[in-house]
Amino acid sequence: MSNKRDWGLTVRGIVRKEDKILILRRHPSSRNNPQKYELPGGKVDPGEFFDEALIREFKEETNLDVNILSLFEVVQDEFISRRTNRPISTLQIMMNLEIIDGELQISSEHDDFKWASMEELKELYDGDLVTPTLRKTLEKRNFKI
């Protein structure tokens, strides 16, 4: 019996404004985690460097140009692949970022955004309104971002 798993790499960014971080709400028609809040980011394409993928994904989702500052956290998550319709395990790399240019404008993948304080993040967490990746990150960091 084979235990072969499909694996993927996802990158996400944390930008801060005062004591708040930027989160995006997934569109209601999203296949995975509709209407749940997440950190901006996305999949790393084959052959793409993860830092370039993060800058690209962040721009696509927020219209913001960012600079990567440091590693924040890494968690593992599970999804259903849109390509194969099979379960896939992903490593989710979260990086601290700074905004260097642009005006915030979300893509069609999302329908809302907010600059959330830790108090607001806890409320969203308690209301099951965050993605599993953000949930795991908050738990792993003892709700300190």
Image (cartoon, grey):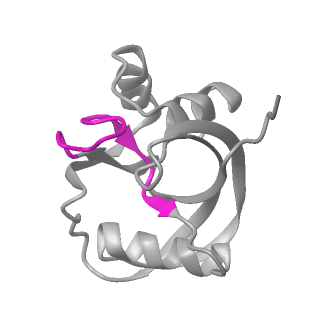
Residue 144, visible in the rendered structure: no
Can residue 128 be seen in the rendering of this structure? yes
Nearer to us in this view, 117 or 121: 121
Q: Nearer the viewer, residue 113 or 1?
A: 1
Q: Is residue 43 left or right of residue 3?
A: left
Residue segment shown in magenta = 27-42
Q: Nearer the viewer, residue 97 or 133?
A: 133
Residue 65 in the magenta stretch? The answer is no
Among the 4 quarters of the image, the one containing residue 88: top right
User: Residue 102 appears at what percent x and percent y?
Assistant: 31, 82
Across and down, in percent, residue 52 comes to 59, 81
Question: Does the magenta run of residues contain 33?
Answer: yes
| Quadrant in the picture for the N terminus | top right
Give coordinates of residue 137: x percent, y percent: 61, 35
Q: Is residue 106 left or right of residue 58?
A: left
Q: Is residue 132 above or below residue 61?
A: above
